[in-house]
Image (cartoon, grey):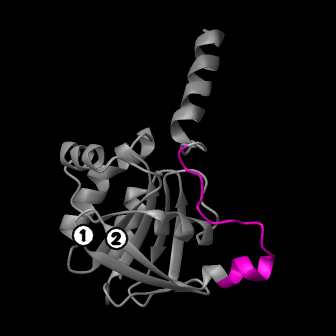
Amino acid sequence: MKKFLYLFSILAVVFFTGCNKEEEAKPVVDNSGSFEELKAMSNKTYTLKTTEGKTISLTVENNTLKSKTIKDKIVLVNFWATWCPPCIKEIPVFNELYEKYSDKFEIVGVLYEKDKDPKELEEFIKKYNIKFPITVGDENFRMAKAFNDVKKVPESYLYSKEGNFAKDYIGEVDKEHLENYIKSN
């Protein structure tokens, strides 16, 4: 019985923590610069390209998110990967909240995989019926560096409709907290 509990505990810890796959998630940004250079990089505009060929422009300055393409909505920026079980587990939750609160809530799925085959990604999006925009490309990695130097996925950042930072989620998003936040704002 003790062996079973020990094994179960280990599996639970592995399952409920974020995924980390360094070889597929290498940042494009060279972090050999000074702290001031890195800080300056974090106060930039990111032009993210979606799998549908659209552009999402986000500016992050001093924990504030601004966007010309997303206005007056609560925004969840979600760093994720196709090989990550907790990321896959979040998809139905995100789809549900995205559809239910589409008038006041936006999700930006930032794929944190380098050189992902577009056809494989398209099949993945269809398989999991992803409803929210997914961004791809090198700009995702530059943005991940600015967002707390993302190394594990899933990792998400919630912003109010005014663009103020509200909460970060390391690992899976707490659906109840997120939905309550959306309802009350």
Quarter placement of the N terminus: top right
- Give the camera-side residue of 115 and 42: 115
- Residue 162: percent from the left, percent from the top? 42, 91
Residue at left offset 59%, top offset 42%: 23
The reply, left or right, for residue 75 in relation to residue 1 is: left
- Which numbered dot is residue 49? 2
| Residue 53 point in image, percent of width and height | 24, 69
Q: What is the C-alpha distance between the residues marked 1 and 2?
A: 6 Å
Q: Which mark is residue 53?
A: 1
Q: Nearer the viewer, residue 74 or 71?
A: 71
The three-letter code of the residue at mark 2 reads: Lys
Q: Quadrant of the C terminus?
A: bottom left
Q: Is residue 2 above or below residue 14?
A: above
Nearer the observer, 179 or 139:
139
Identify residue type, mark 1: Gly
Tally the marks.
2
Q: Which mark is residue 18?
A: none
Is 28 in the magenta? yes
Residue at figure coordinates x 39%, y 65% from the top left: 178
- Residues in magenta, as a range: 24-40
* Secondary structure under the numbered disc 2 in the rendered image: strand
Q: Is residue 56 magenta?
A: no
Disc 2 crowd, CA 10 A, few/some/many (<14, 14-19, 20+):
many
Seen at 52% across and 40% down, the residue is 16
Give the residue displayed 34% in from the left and 91% down from the top: 68
Q: Categorize mark 1 by other alpha carbons within 10 Å: few (<14), some (14-19), many (20+).
A: few
Residue 127 seen: yes
SS of the residue at dot 1?
loop
Q: Examine the image and state in which quarter residue 74 appears.
A: bottom left
Residue situated furthest right in the rendering: 34
Q: Position of residue 14 (x, y in %)?
A: 57, 33
Asked if the residue at tag 2 contacts the one at tag 1, i.e. Cβ–Cβ closer than 8 Å, the answer is yes
